[in-house]
Amino acid sequence: MDSKHLEELTKTIAERNGTTPEAVRREMEAARNSAWDTDDSSARGRQKVLFPAGKPQLSEFLEVIAKEIKKA
């Protein structure tokens, strides 16, 4: 997901929820950080498979997770 698409996404979510794009992005980053900092060994193993280079940027995280959800 490129930065323009991420910007449009956060703007749309913000408008639908009566908040700012900045607040949406902060919440998305907090969710990514929380997921990344889990003690769940199964989740940690999946992270290593999906993100072998380590903690991803928010745009990469959202893109990969969206693809995984579509597969399910």
Image (spheres, helix red, strand yellow):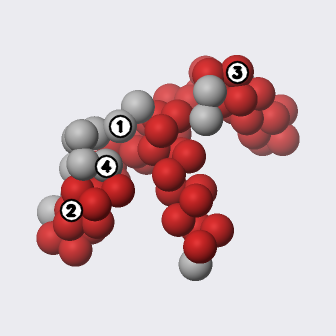
Q: Secondary structure at mark 3?
A: helix
Marks 4/3 in contact by CB < 8 Å: the verdict is: no
Q: Earlier in the sequence, mark 3 or mark 2?
A: 3
Disc sitting over residue 70 in the figure? none
Q: Could you tell me which secondary element the residue under label 2 belongs to?
A: helix
**Sequence-wise, which precedes: disc 1 or disc 3?**
3
Q: Which image quarter holds the C terminus?
A: bottom right
> Residue at position x 62%, y 27% from top?
2
Give the labeled residue for mark 4: 51
Q: CA distance from mark 2 to mark 1?
A: 14 Å
The amino acid at mark 2 is: Arg
- Which x, y percent locates residue 11? 76, 28
Between the residue at mark 4 and the residue at mark 3, the CA separation in whole angstroms equals 22 Å
Q: Which residue is mark 3?
A: 4
Q: For the residues marked 4 and 2, what is the alpha-carbon distance in whole angstroms?
A: 10 Å
Q: Which residue is under mark 2?
A: 44
Q: Position of residue 67 (x, y in %)?
A: 58, 59
Residue closest to the eye, 15 or 3: 3
Q: Are the residues tagged 4 and 2 within 8 Å (C-beta)?
A: no
Q: Earlier in the sequence, mark 1 or mark 4?
A: 4
Q: Are marks 1 and 4 in contact (CB under 8 Å)?
A: yes
Labels 2 and 1 touching (C-beta < 8 A): no
Give how far across and how far down residue 53 sits, in percent: 24, 40
Q: CA distance from mark 3 to mark 2?
A: 29 Å
Considering the numbered disc 4 on the image, is that residue within a helix, a strand or a loop? loop
Residue 53 or residue 13, whichever sits in front: 53
For label 1, the residue is 56
Residue at 16% in and 63% down: 39
Q: Earlier in the sequence, mark 2 or mark 1?
A: 2
Disc nearest the viewer among 4 and 2: 4
